[in-house]
Amino acid sequence: MTEKLNLRWALNHALDEEMARDKKVFLMGEDIGKAGGTFGITRGLYEKYGDLRVKDTPISEEGIMGAAVGAALVGYRPIVDLMFMDFITIAMEQLANQAAKTYYFSGGKIKVPLVVRALAGGGFRAGGHHSQTLESWFTHVPGLKVVYPSTPYDAKGLLKASIRDDNPVVFLEHKSLLGLKGAVPSEEYVIPLGKADIKREGKDVTIVTFGRMIHTCLEAAKELSELGIEAEVVDPRTLLPLDKETIIQSVQKTNRVMIVQEAPLHSGFGAEIAAMISEEAVYDLDAPIKRVAGAFTPIPVGKTEDFLYPSVSDIVLTAKSLVD
């Protein structure tokens, strides 16, 4: 059986099921208790599991992350709720310099089963301190896994896999997708980390994208289809580790590829995907790799934000330039 859930409730159900399954799983964050979280994702969990497992914290991302890493080191499975990804800068020492390295520096003897849930991306016109998508900062850190779902189905299955992982996972939730509805199985399921999904099949051009841009690209793919161009949309879902095999297979089928990301072009994760394709499939390409990305500028408050991100027309024009 399936039920239709928005992405917010898919996340809530994943947290609920994993807390019921394993008493070592607990939540930490600002306003996640009785308030149910700023965006309602933890609603009802405080009432069900109590204040020992749904911990409201002071406004200190550094303190939250440090306490969570300590709890993970002694065998708990903390899930940190970061209200906005932008604030993760304050907690980088604990995450990138401690949690990510412990497994390696202990020779694999000490694990850090920690999940950091962080709301990312624009769409709320909330300005430069509440709208960034910083995935490429974390895909550069050995020892972290980085997950970026785009649908309610993927969000639930991937969050459950992340909670069961024995080392740190940065789990990104695009805030503009929280209300997106989709079919979610009522039965137990887990989506393995590191497995991409083809969101739309095509034969003429491959579009690799993730997060909110999946939906922009799917809309562009419909327009391209009306022009006689069938685009294949590949969603890595997990950026680190990256499912190279699925991307390469798609490129070998279409012989043309573009990468779309919300973050700025410069040093973005799309550059890593482009480099990987160049190294492993350059002789399968009939045209140069193209990238479409956000503007390289701090995000302004208000309507101006709308002009910074890739649009459907940007993607259609770029895809046409590859095929024509």
Image (cartoon, rainbow, N blue to C red):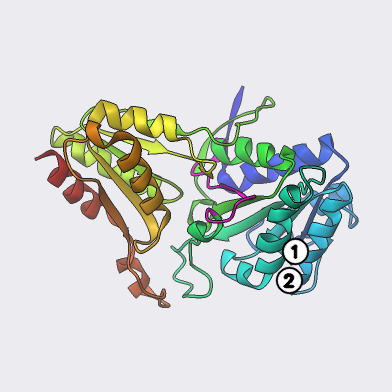
Marks 1 and 2: in contact by CB < 8 Å? yes
Q: Is residue 210 above or below residue 266?
A: above
Q: Magenta residues? A: 139-153
Is residue 62 shown in magenta? Answer: no
Image quadrant in which you'd find residue 18 = top right
Q: Secondary structure at mark 1?
A: helix
Which quarter of the image is occupied by the N terminus? top right
Instruction: Give how far across and how far down residue 83 sits, in percent.
Output: 64, 65
Of the numbered discs in the image, which one, if any, rests on residue 62?
2
Q: Residues within 10 Å of mark 1 (few under 14, many from 20)?
A: many
- Residue 147 is inside the magenta segment: yes
Label 2 sits on a secondary structure element that is: helix
In the displayed structure image, the side of residue 126 where residue 295 appears, left or right: left
From mark 2 to mark 1, how far is it between C-alphas? 5 Å
Who's the residue at 32% across and 67% down the image? 295
Percent of width and height locating residue 200: 35, 31
The residue positioned 52% from the left and 32% from the top of the image is: 195
Q: Quadrant of residue 247?
A: top left
Q: Nearer the viewer, residue 63 or 56?
A: 63
Q: Nearer the viewer, residue 239 or 295?
A: 239
Q: Residue furthest top?
A: 1
| Amino acid beneath label 1 | Met
**Pointer 2 local density, CA inside 10 Å: few below 14, some 14–19, many at least 20:** some
Q: Residue at x 72, y 64 (%)?
A: 94
The quarter of the rendered structure image containing the C terminus is top left
Label 1, on which residue?
Answer: 65
- 323 with respect to 90 (left or right): left
